[in-house]
């Protein structure tokens, strides 16, 4: 999508609608980078992610983004600056990776705990977050909770820090002894040591500094205090300085090793950051939709664009939702050109900008401020809105408009949307109207979707002589002499000039003269337009009712389908439970029969033969049950090489032979062949 469209339609300003709902910098960065998408698949995916995030929120569940940081710029800088990541930066990496793992785990847990929560796209994003256990463990072993390198990060560092601690203790002990010496009492300005350039010094009164043997490091600004490193701690100070240098080198080595480990996982980290950014953006958009009354747009199968009760998002941010008059906007199969006429009241331009911006939002996968929304994909949206002049080319307002429109016409096609404000203005009305009609003809031939505004009355009749074109106007209240800002599609706008003049106190004779000067043809045209307006208004009413019925029907259908899906899932669950219970019961019965057969195998007549007959009939009854019939049907269709699952063995085995007469299957288990009955096999 071209940058000019994004700028003129205030695409960036619209993002303020969603920014407060984002949880972390990842989502804010994703929102800042967001632009309209070119692919229907990408748009559908983004919209469905928001829909699924809304379902998670509706179930009272959350998205834990705690500890997540946007590491992208940090990773970028690491390649250029020639030094390792700092401890606090490594700490941020560790927190983010741990947060990413937790986020993925929680969302997957949501999916498993809520049977009716179907979130396949969010789960796909979670699977883009790989496990970072080894790396987070390593970071935790190097950086402590305060963001410092741990002493046990390496044996060498532990040894160095033990030495530092020991030396500091000796220095502190010797300094304390000096401060307690009676012969030096009154020499010190303070009873505590200070540090200058990493060395321990004492604040000595300058006039008595000769009494404290040592190295002078600094003098106070007033000159009254000298900072002296006692001679007795100089060797320890030198040793301490050496150990501190060793500590810095060892820390740098550890940081480099850890930084390399992070960079080795950079591809996985960036993939995880991208997934978290998408999840945060989807969550934020879903929250904004719930709080601000936005709806998720639907991609139109018939190539229609329809926004009902639409509100301009930036206008809503500035003035409040209650101050914005909602309007219905659409381009559909019946008309792909919309001509908005009427006086200059500001409502026409707002309608253009609202349509253009909502199309950009929908194509970015965002919910829009409307009661319902349906849209088609546009390769480009070309707006000519406002009175910008080209100072570089010294073009007038009219020339600037024409220059811009000429570029748009060169790209005009069925997959572009043109938004032309005040078409034909800025020049002689007759020539402007002629040029405007010629432009509309050009777009009409190429079936280019377009919405144009004009105050030229001669273009009002254009829609009545062309198929695929419709009029519209911004409603005007003659009582208050102001626009209501409601857009009336199908109704051309009247100028209301004489009505306004009359109500503003222009003398009656002037008004009457003006009415007589209006050409009869114009009066007749006005009457025809009024009749046409009544017809179109009635059609508009019927269409609105039909649209309401369509939405209600669709809602009822969706609810019915949801009930059917839940009933089907419940039926399958009950069926599985019943089959499991029946399977367990039949297994117990067959075990009892087998035991009975064993006990009666050597019984004398007539008990032995009768027992065998009872056992045979019992087996026939078991085989006649629906469950066993399904298993037999399944087993009889098996072929050599098929794999079947044997529940009692808890594994899948390959079929070697099906003994249909014996109702048994020979299976291959390693180097062995085993026989199982049909009843021991699953039928799925």
Image: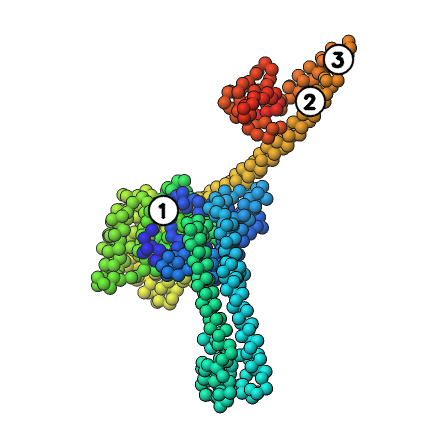
Identify the element where label 2 is drawn.
helix
Check disc 1 and report the residue beneath it: 38
On the picture, is 251 further left or further right than 345?
right
Report the Cα–Cα distance between label 3 and label 2: 20 Å
Does residue 579 sit above or below 125 in this rendering? above
Residue under the image location 65 percent in, 27 percent down: 583
Label 1: which secondary element: loop
Mark 1 and mark 3: Cα distance apart in space: 82 Å
Whichever of labels 3 and 2 marks the residue nearer the N terminus, that label is 2
Residue bearing the label numbered 2: 590
Q: In the rendered view, does 486 fall on the left or right side of 111?
A: left
Q: Which residue is mark 3?
A: 602
Q: Are marks 2 and 1 in contact (CB under 8 Å)?
A: no
For discs 2 and 1, the disc positioned in front in the rendered view: 2
Give the class, few, some or many, for how many residues have Cα within 10 Å of label 2's Cα (few <14, many ≥20). Answer: some
What colouring method underlies this structural image? rainbow
Which of marks 1 and 2 precedes in the sequence?
Answer: 1
Mark before the other along the chain sequence, 1 or 3: 1
Q: Nearer the viewer, residue 388 or 170?
A: 170
Left or right: residue 490 versus residue 655 is left
Marks 2 and 1 sit apart, C-alpha to C-alpha, by 64 Å
Q: Quadrant of residue 421?
A: bottom left
In the foreground, 652 or 51: 652
Q: Residue at x 38, y 52 (%)?
A: 35
Mark 3 secondary-structure assignment: loop
Of marks 3 and 2, the one in the foreground: 3
Q: Which mark is residue 287?
A: none
Residue 675 visible in the shown view: yes
Q: Residues within 10 Å of mark 3 (few under 14, many from 20)?
A: few
**Mark 3 in CB contact with mark 2 (< 8 angstroms):** no
Q: Quadrant of the C terminus?
A: top right
Q: Looking at this view, is 200 or 369 the one in front? A: 200
């Amino acid at each position: 999508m071209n940058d000019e469209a994004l700028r003129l339609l205030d695409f960036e300003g619209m993002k303020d609608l969603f920014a407060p709902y984002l949880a972390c910098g990842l989502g804010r960065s994703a929102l800042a980078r967001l632009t309209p998408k070119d692919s229907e698949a990408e748009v559908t995916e983004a919209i469905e992610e928001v829909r699924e995030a809304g379902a998670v929120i509706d179930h009272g569940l959350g998205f834990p983004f705690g500890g997540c940081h946007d590491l992208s710029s940090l990773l970028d800088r690491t390649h250029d600056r020639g030094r390792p990541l700092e401890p606090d930066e490594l700490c941020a990496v560790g927190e983010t990776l741990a947060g990413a793992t937790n986020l993925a785990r929680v969302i997957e847990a949501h999916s498993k705990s809520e049977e009716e929560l179907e979130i396949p796209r969010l789960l796909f994003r979670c699977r883009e977050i790989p496990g970072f256990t080894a790396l987070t463990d390593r970071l935790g072993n190097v950086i402590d909770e305060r963001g410092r390198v741990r002493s046990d990060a390496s044996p060498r560092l532990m040894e160095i820090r033990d030495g530092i601690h020991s030396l500091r203790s000796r220095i502190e002990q010797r300094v304390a002894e000096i401060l307690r010496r009676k012969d030096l009492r009154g020499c010190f300005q303070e009873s505590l040591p200070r540090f200058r350039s990493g060395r321990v010094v004492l604040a000595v009164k300058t006039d008595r500094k000769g009494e404290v043997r040592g190295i002078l490091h600094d003098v106070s600004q007033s000159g009254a205090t000298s900072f002296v490193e006692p001679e007795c701690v100089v060797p320890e100070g030198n040793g301490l300085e050496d150990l501190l240098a060793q500590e810095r080198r060892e820390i740098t080595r550890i940081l480099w090793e850890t930084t390399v480990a992070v960079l080795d996982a950079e591809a996985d980290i960036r993939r995880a950051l991208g997934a978290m950014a998408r999840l945060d953006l989807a969550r934020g958009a879903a929250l904004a939709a719930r709080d601000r009354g936005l709806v998720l747009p639907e991609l139109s199968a018939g190539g229609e664009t329809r926004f009902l009760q639409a509100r301009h998002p930036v206008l809503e941010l500035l003035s409040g939702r209650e101050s914005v008059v909602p309007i219905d906007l659409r381009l559909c199969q019946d008309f792909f050109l919309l001509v908005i006429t009427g006086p200059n009241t500001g409502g026409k331009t707002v309608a253009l900008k609202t349509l253009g911006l909502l199309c950009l939002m929908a194509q970015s996968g965002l919910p829009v401020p409307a009661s319902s929304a349906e849209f088609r994909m546009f390769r480009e949206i070309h707006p000519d809105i406002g009175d910008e002049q080209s100072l570089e080319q010294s073009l007038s307002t009219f020339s600037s408009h024409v220059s811009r429109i000429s570029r748009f016409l060169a790209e005009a096609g069925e997959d572009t949307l043109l938004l032309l404000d005040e078409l034909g203005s800025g020049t002689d009305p007759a020539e402007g109207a002629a040029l405007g009609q010629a432009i509309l003809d050009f777009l009409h031939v190429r079936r280019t979707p377009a919405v144009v505004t004009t105050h030229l009355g001669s273009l009002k009749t254009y829609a009545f002589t062309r198929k695929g074109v419709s009029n519209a106007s911004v409603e005007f209240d003659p009582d208050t002499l102001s626009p209501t800002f409601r857009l009336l599609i199908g109704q051309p706008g009247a100028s209301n000039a004489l009505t306004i003049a009359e109500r503003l106190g222009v003398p009656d004779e002037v008004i009457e003269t003006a009415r007589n000067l209006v050409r009869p043809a114009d009066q007749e045209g006005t009457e025809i337009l009024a009749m046409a307006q009544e017809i179109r208004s009635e059609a508009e009413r019927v269409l609105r009712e039909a649209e309401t019925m369509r939405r209600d029907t669709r809602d009822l259908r969706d609810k019915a389908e949801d009930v059917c899906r839940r009933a089907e899932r419940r039926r399958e669950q009950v069926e599985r439970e019943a089959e499991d219970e029946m399977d367990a019961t039949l297994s117990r019965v067959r075990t009892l029969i087998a035991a009975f057969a064993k006990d009666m195998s050597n019984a004398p007549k007539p008990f032995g033969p009768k027992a065998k007959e009872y056992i045979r009939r019992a087996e026939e009854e078991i085989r006649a049950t629906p469950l066993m019939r399904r298993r037999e049907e399944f087993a009889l269709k098996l072929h050599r090489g098929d794999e079947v699952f044997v529940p009692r063995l808890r594994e899948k085995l390959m079929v070697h032979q099906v003994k249909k007469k014996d109702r048994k299957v020979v299976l291959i288990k390693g180097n062995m062949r085993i026989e199982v009955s049909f009843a021991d096999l699953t039928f799925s």
